[in-house]
Amino acid sequence: MAIDAEKVTPLRPPRPCPECGKPSQRATFPFCSVRCKNVDLNRWLTGSYVIPATEDEDDGSEDERRSET
């Protein structure tokens, strides 16, 4: 009993690779290849991608208030 590829509904819609724009592959989703996947990982590890963080001004003042009382 063979399954026709035309009758199978994909679980995810096809999307372009975020690195090069080629169609993504199932094995390396959302990337098109292991190379693009590794390029993205390297950018995270070297600090090229940074998630901005904000420091709250209230954090230090609450500690100072507690120590005064």
Image (spheres, rainbow, N blue to C red):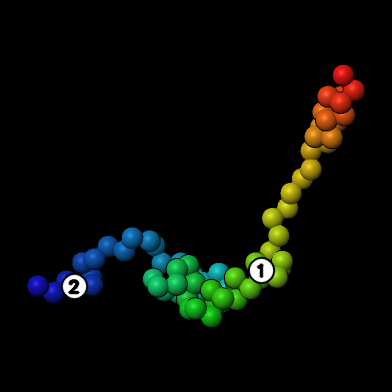
Q: Tag 1, which secondary structure?
A: helix
Residue drawn where x is 23% and y is 70% of the image: 6
Task: Please name which of the two marks, 2 or 1, marks the residue nearer to the observer.
Answer: 1
Q: Which residue is mark 1?
A: 45
Count all numbered tags in the image, as a single digit.
2
Q: Amino acid type of disc 1?
A: Leu
Residue drawn where x is 59% and y is 70% of the image: 41
Q: Which residue is mark 2?
A: 4
Query: Which percent across, then down, holds residue 50?
Result: 71, 60
Separation (CA) of disc 2 from disc 1: 42 Å
Query: Which percent across, then down, holds residue 32?
Result: 47, 76
Residue found farthest to the bottom: 35
Q: Quadrant of residue 38?
A: bottom right
Residue 21 visible: no
Q: Is residue 26 above or below residue 61?
A: below
Query: Which percent across, then down, holds residue 51?
Result: 69, 55
In front of the other: 57 or 19: 57
Q: Amino acid type of disc 2?
A: Asp
Question: How dense is the environment of label 2, judged by Cα within 10 Å: few (below 14), some, or many (20 and up)?
Answer: few
Query: Which percent across, then down, holds residue 61?
Result: 86, 30
- For the C terminus, the quadrant is top right
Residue 27 visible: yes
